[in-house]
Image: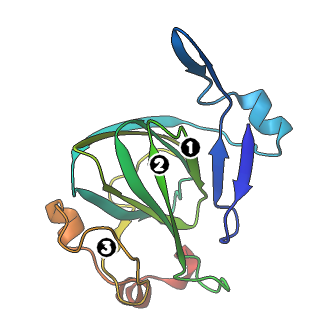
Amino acid sequence: MKILPMTLPGVLIIEPDVYRDERGWFLETYHCDKYEEAGLSFSFVQDNCSSSVRNTLRGLHAQLRRPQGKLVRVSRGEIFDVAVDIRRGSPTFAAWEGVILSAENFKQLYVPPGYAHGFCVLSDIAEVEYKCTDVYTPGDELTIAWNDAQIGIQWPHNSPILSPKDAAGQSLEVLWETLPSFLI
């Protein structure tokens, strides 16, 4: 397993060992002991899976009181996956990084608590699986505008398919002005 730190603190690309032979391939998508040996100690409490069509954009999402770390992988298709630093006072506040995850490259992205997460589907269909370090809590979620100018993500599509919730996302600046500072 290779662990490749990205520029943003705590954001990691994980390349699992893939064992191939004439039958196909095998890999461990997560092994707590091996991750701990590599210095990554996560306690996952929830697994999620989504299926989306080409040009769908999900995000940017985060939780306030129960922030989630996410270990993201693609089991079918291809996505452009993004992490955004939303930690108030961070030197990299509002900075983002993106990576292509696919069923073919087997890469995983770890998005730590304190970051917003989103992805855009590049293939006809993509199935995305992710482990979370805390449970989803309705009413605790932030939805940041996918096209927030302050963040400036260079998405692969200019007019993605959005859910009503994602279409109503607010700018990071507006969200932070309306939230009590103790929450961030």
Q: Which residue is mark 2?
A: 101
Q: Nearer the viewer, mark 3 or mark 1?
A: 1
Q: Nearer the viewer, mark 2 or mark 3?
A: 2
Q: Quadrant of residue 32?
A: top right
Outermost residue, top side: 23
Mark 3 crowd level (few <14, some 14–19, many ≥20, 10 Å Cα): many
Q: Which residue is mark 3?
A: 146
Dot 2 amino acid type? Leu
Is residue 11 left or right of 124 when viewed as pictured? right
Going 71% across and 54% down the picture, which residue do you hit?
4
Going 38% across and 83% down the picture, which residue do you hit?
175
Vertically, is 33 above or below 125? above
Q: Which of marks 1 and 3 precedes in the sequence? A: 1
The colour mode here is rainbow
Q: Quadrant of residue 153?
A: bottom left
Query: Picture coordinates of residue 6 (x, y %)?
Result: 67, 64
Q: Which residue is mark 1?
A: 107
Residue in front for this viewpoint, 28 or 123: 123
Dot 1 amino acid type? Lys
Label 1: which secondary element = loop
User: CB of mark 2 within 8 Å of CB of mark 1?
Assistant: yes
Query: Picture coordinates of residue 24 (x, y %)?
Result: 51, 15
Q: Which of marks 1 and 2 precedes in the sequence? A: 2
Residue in front for this viewpoint, 154 or 20: 20
Label 2: which secondary element = strand
Q: Which of marks 3 and 2 precedes in the sequence? A: 2
Q: Quadrant of residue 173?
A: bottom left
Mark 2 crowd level (few <14, some 14–19, many ≥20, 10 Å Cα): many
Quadrant that contains the C terminus: bottom right
Residue in front for this viewpoint, 65 or 12: 12
Going 57% across and 67% down the picture, which residue do you hit?
114
Dot 3 amino acid type? Trp
